[in-house]
Amino acid sequence: MKRLNFLLLFRFFIFLLITILSFYSCTDAQVILPSNIEIGAGKGDLVIKQPTPSGVKHAVWGAMAPPEIKQKVEKAKEDVTISEILSNPNKYHLKTVLVKGEVLAVKHKISRKGNPYTVFALSDGTSAIKIFTFGTPEINRGNRVKVKGIFYKVKYVGRYTFYNEIDATDGWIKRE
């Protein structure tokens, strides 16, 4: 009888754990990992490789992401060219940048949560970079614009990974 109760209780906890993990993996949560954290060998493992300011020397999270980790965003040199950013992405990672160029392609979309957002390519004539912002700015292909935002060499949003992108959500987009 005790063994039967134990098995039922064990199955219940496994079911509960699977339910929680599957709910978490379906959310649109945004996780931005600092440079001292990377995805480990196991699926979904996040590993801290170096000591952190809180003193944690090495930790592994299983299928769940760590608590929200925010890094200080530094201000970069104003009026940076897109070519300069893409040739040295480590230098500009998590820094506020100001770029200008011609809009190549615009996509207005709506997230699964119902939030409108816009993604477009911006070219300085030699290179192009992807720009992301929530909302629907009034821009069209061929417009010349200035964009102020945070450059991400790598950005994790839910189950998606984005590379070399400027997030202008907290910045601005202005037509010239």
Image (cartoon, rainbow, N blue to C red):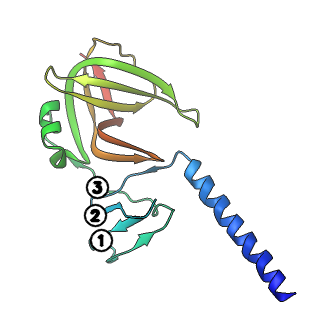
Q: Label 1 is placed on what type of residue?
A: Thr
Q: Which of marks 2 and 3 is nearer the N terminus?
A: 2
Q: Quadrant of residue 16?
A: bottom right
Q: Name the residue under label 3.
A: 72
The vertical placement of 63 against 96, above or below, is: below
Q: Which residue appears at 68% of the width and 69% of the height? A: 14
Q: In which quarter of the image is residue 57?
A: bottom left
Q: Quadrant of residue 46?
A: bottom left
Q: Earlier in the sequence, mark 2 or mark 1?
A: 2
For the residues marked 2 and 1, what is the alpha-carbon distance in whole angstroms?
8 Å
Total numbered labels placed on residues in the image: 3
Q: Which residue appears at 12% of the width and 35% of the height? A: 84
Q: Label 2 is placed on what type of residue?
A: Asn
The vertical placement of 93 against 15, above or below, is: above
Name the element at disc 2. loop
Q: Which of marks 2 and 1 is in front?
A: 2
Q: Is residue 81 visible to us here?
A: no
For the residues marked 2 and 3, what is the alpha-carbon distance in whole angstroms?
14 Å
Q: Which residue appears at 31% of the width and 57% of the height? A: 71
Q: Are marks 2 and 3 in contact (CB under 8 Å)?
A: no
Q: Nearer the viewer, mark 2 or mark 3?
A: 2
Q: Which of marks 1 and 3 is nearer the N terminus?
A: 1
Badge 3 crowding class, 10 Å Cα cut-off, few under 14, some 14 to 19, many 20 or more, is few
Measured as percent of width and height from the top left, residue 164 is found at 27, 39
The residue closer to the viewer here, 163 or 111, is: 163
Measured as percent of width and height from the top left, residue 44 is found at 46, 59
Q: Name the residue under label 2.
A: 36
Name the image quarter holding the C terminus: top left
